[in-house]
Image (cartoon, helix red, strand yellow):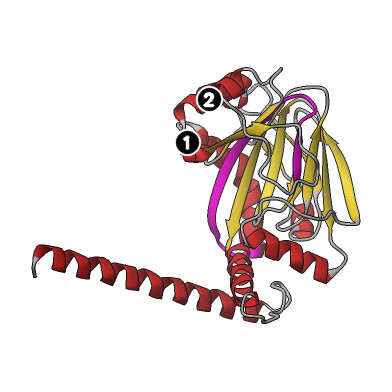
Amino acid sequence: MTASSGVLVDIDRPLLASSMWRAPFLLRHDLVGHPLVTRDAVVRLAGERPDYSISYGCSEQPVLSTGPGIERQGSAVDAAANIENNRSWIVLSYVDHATGYGELLDAVSTGFRSVLAARDGPIRARSGSIFMTSPRGVAPAHVDRHHNILLQVEGFKQLSVGEFDNEAVEEAELQNHFEGHNHLLRLPARFQTFTIGPGEGIYIPPYRPHWIVGHDNVTVGLSCSVRTRTSHRVELAHTFNSKVRRLGLRPRMPGVESRLDAAKAVALTAGREMQDARRTAARQLRGRFSSGK
């Protein structure tokens, strides 16, 4: 596995095929020292990327965080440049839109995407984020909606990945997530903790609770998230469920019956299209009235 060969991540394809949606597993990569994922690269990107794609804050957080966290003063560039001592975290999202990073994400995710496409339907999107955190920083417990590989480039961290063994608790946490809350309110009773360092990574299945505690070092990592036809359908089904629960209904959890998930996805998509059509018609009417027609 070398950068010159174009293979940057060593994916055990049979293991991925058997672990999809089910279990995390460790992997190896060849990104350590790559010029696009160094501290200097993060500082540069923090000054170049649009504000909507940059988040940063205080890294001294509990694993279970019920609030938005402590906001940092100053600029994202300052947060990134002084990461060694300022007890901060910074996330640069959608880095695949920055020069050179799209090609990097393609190279990183080639094997990953090919297995997912064969088992989970066509790939709808892939996106990348870079994370950098001060020593002993914490990323509170949360879930992600799509297949994800996290590649550690600098420093060591402990990453825990769990699974709720109570469907009612899982349903409540996912409802909370789809209502716009970033973090979990409860931790799963069962979880695995992995220590990962430079050159190591991990696959995290969709909707698996996970959280991170850094060691006494700055950590830098790259994540690649892949949206498949199936993960997109499940996301829409969860969104549908979140809406109908507000009406007092108790829909079945997504993933139990794919046809039902598909029906929910179709209904939600149709509803959104109707809303978009109404908005378009309203804008057109306002334009006619304002022009006197």
Q: Position of residue 39 (x, y in %)?
A: 62, 21
Q: Which of marks 1 and 2 is in front?
A: 2
Relative side of 200 to 283, left or right: right
| Membership of 130 in magenta stretch | yes
Q: Which residue: 62% across, 39% down?
A: 108
Q: Quick check: is 268 in the magenta stretch?
A: no
| Residue 220, position as x, y percentages in the image | 69, 28
| Residue topped by disc 1 | 51
* Residue pointed to by mark 2: 75
Residue stretch rendered in magenta on the structure: 120-140
Figure quadrant of the C terminus: bottom left
Q: Label 1: few (<14), some or many (≥20) within 10 Å? A: few
What's the CA distance linking mark 1 and mark 2? 10 Å
Give left or right: position of 84 versus 225.
right
SS of the residue under disc 2: loop
Q: In this view, does 165 lie above or below 58?
A: below
Residue at 89% from the left image edge and 48% from the top image edge:
192
